[in-house]
Structures are given as C-alpha cells and as structure tokens.
Image (cartoon, grey):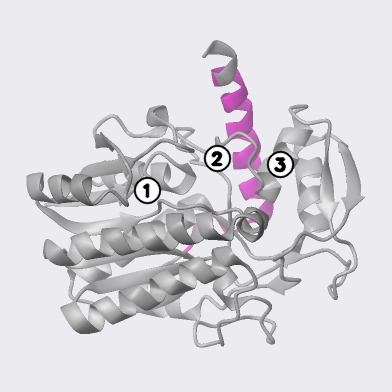
Amino acid sequence: MSVLVTGGGGYIGSHMVWRLVDEGEDVIVLDNFVTGFNWAIAPEATVVVGDCGDHDLLARVFGENEIDAVIHFAGSVVVPDSVVQPLAYYHNNTVKSHALITAAVANGVSSFIFSSTAAVYGTPSVEMVGEDAALHPESPYGRSKMMTEAMLSDAGLAHGLNYVALRYFNVAGADPAGRTGQSTRGATHLIKVASEAALGKRAGMTVFGGDYQTPDGTCVRDYIHVSDLVEAHHDALGYLRQGGDSLIANCGYGRGYSVLEVIDAVKQVSGVDFAVTSGERRPGDPAMIVASPERIRSALGWTPKYDDLFGIVRDALTWEEALGRRNQTD
C-alpha cells in the first residue's frame, strides 16, 4: 500500500516524505511546485506534478496506485494574504480539498490526515486552548481550514472515512539531518524571517503591532519544531491504520513566546544584533494563542523531542546557512 502526500515539496510536506521514506513506506507525492521544491523531496518517493484539485489527475493517481492513506498538506498559508485574496484561499484550500476528499472516498481510502491550523480558534478566551473551544477564525485562511474540517467530519459520517485533523500552532526549525527546511522565498514565518535578517539576507525585519494585550505588547504564539510536527503525523497514520476513530488534535507544546522573545532568541543564537523596526498590526492576527497538547499526547502517544526554542532557532539558522550555499550554486 502507498501513502499519497499532497504538497510534498513544501516545508512540512518534504519533512513528512523523508520521515515516511525512512520508515520504508511507498510514498507518492502530488505537488504543483508553485511554492514547493522538487529537490527537497526524498529521491525514493514517486513524484506526480500536478494539482490536488484536478479531478482527472486524481482519478489517474488513485487508479494506478494502491493508496490506503492520504496526508494533505497542499494549500495557501499566509493569513494577511488571505484577507486580501479571500476567494483565492477558499478555492485553493477548500474547493481543492473537496476534490481530494471526494477522490479519497471514491477510491476507498481508509485514512486521511489533514493539515489544519490553530487559526480556526481566532483569539481564544482561555490561556491554553483545547480542541473543544469555540471556533472563531479571524481570517479567510482560518475559515477555509475550518470548512475543510467540516467536510471531513461529514464525509466520515456518511462514507466511513476516518481522519485526523491536526491543528498546527507555529511551525519552525528544520530537519536536524539537514535534508530539508523552510525554503520558500519571501516567507512570512517569524523565525525564518529573523534568521534571514541575522544572516544578512534581509536588511532587518518588522514587528507588526506592539500594543496587544500581552506581557510585552507583541503577539504570543506556541512554536513547534517541524520534526515533532511530522512525528505527530506519523503517529496519526499508525493510529488510523490500527482502526482509530476520527480525531481532531492540537499540535503545540503548551508554551507561548512573544515576537520579541523569539527575536531575542535568534539574536542570542546567531550572535547578530540585526535591525528591528515597528509596524502596524496585520489584519487577522490574534493577540495570543497557545495549545493545550493533552489530547494528542493521550490519544496518539505523541512525545516531542525538540521542545526547546533555542534548539528550534539553531536548526532554522543552520538550514538558512545551507540554503544560502545552495542558492549560490543553483
């Protein structure tokens, strides 16, 4: 049997492909490479270039392979962009997910793992948000993911599709073995941006909003190492293959860091005091969101190995340096 990974050339998807290949899985990657990179994919995987919303292509991929599981990463992920381009986000994240779920159901796929987001919560009213909290997404990005969760729930009830929807908090870092990392040009992830500034790839960086109701006025987030996030997907795959019921789970450590704390960590690890300027708030950014990770630990047996902000920053900086060398030779 094979695992279909959509968006397998992207940041998190490429890490997932390497993890599956390390385990000896037969992996099929479906990616249109609008933002992903073919070179980031483990060479043992089969790569299909195309779109996860292409009904004819999906019919061919499922028809030609014995796929028992889908791990769905493909989508658009920048919150402020979704506010400016909401219809594009609903099309890319929701309409195309509908096509993929439809194909999975039609071809008898038994396990579906979905890349969801903490943005479905909006700004929670509690310090640590659990999966049963009310959903109040504050951006089209969050709403597009919430809609896909609803489709999976309904498809599960109607067609017996078992799924795990993993609500990511802020993903950062890179493969400790140096095989892949966050490579997107113009990325907006805080640790990525700060690492670029520390290495002189940017003249500096901007903090968006300093007047939030948080200890230092900047947004607070729960940062999770990408390798721990990938391990959560691996645990979810095993759980579903063993007959586990559908599940929604947070992916975070249960500890928040402010934007300024993260920037300070990057400065300490890199030894570079890069320029930081203040800017206006960005639309769609909640003030604070930190995961309650109890469900994923108890239901999936997930145990993080990289729960350390400075370690996450070190891996991000190491990858950023390697990426700079790669870009110079391309």
Please, which residue is most extreme toward the front here?
87
| Amino acid at the residue labelled 2 | Gln
Mark 2 or mark 1, earlier in chain: 1
Q: Which residue does the image show at 40% across and 73% down from the upper left? A: 149
In the displayed structure, 178 sits above or below 135; it is above
| Amino acid at the residue labelled 3 | Val
Residue that mark 3 sits on: 193
Pinpoint residue 171: horizontal percent, then vertical percent: 57, 55
Find the magenta span and give its range.
Answer: 304-326
Q: Secondary structure at mark 2?
A: loop
Marks 1 and 3 close (CB-CB < 8 Å) = no
Pinpoint residue 234: horizontal percent, then vertical percent: 33, 58
Query: Does the magenta stretch mainly form a helix, a strand or a loop?
Result: helix
Task: Please state if 70 lies on the left or on the right of 274 as rendered.
Answer: left
Residue that mark 2 sits on: 182
Mark 3 or mark 2, earlier in chain: 2
Pinpoint residue 151: horizontal percent, then vertical percent: 34, 74
| Distance from Cα at disc 3 to Cα at disc 2 | 10 Å
Residue that mark 1 sits on: 16
Q: Secondary structure at mark 1?
A: helix
| Distance from Cα at disc 1 to Cα at disc 3 | 23 Å
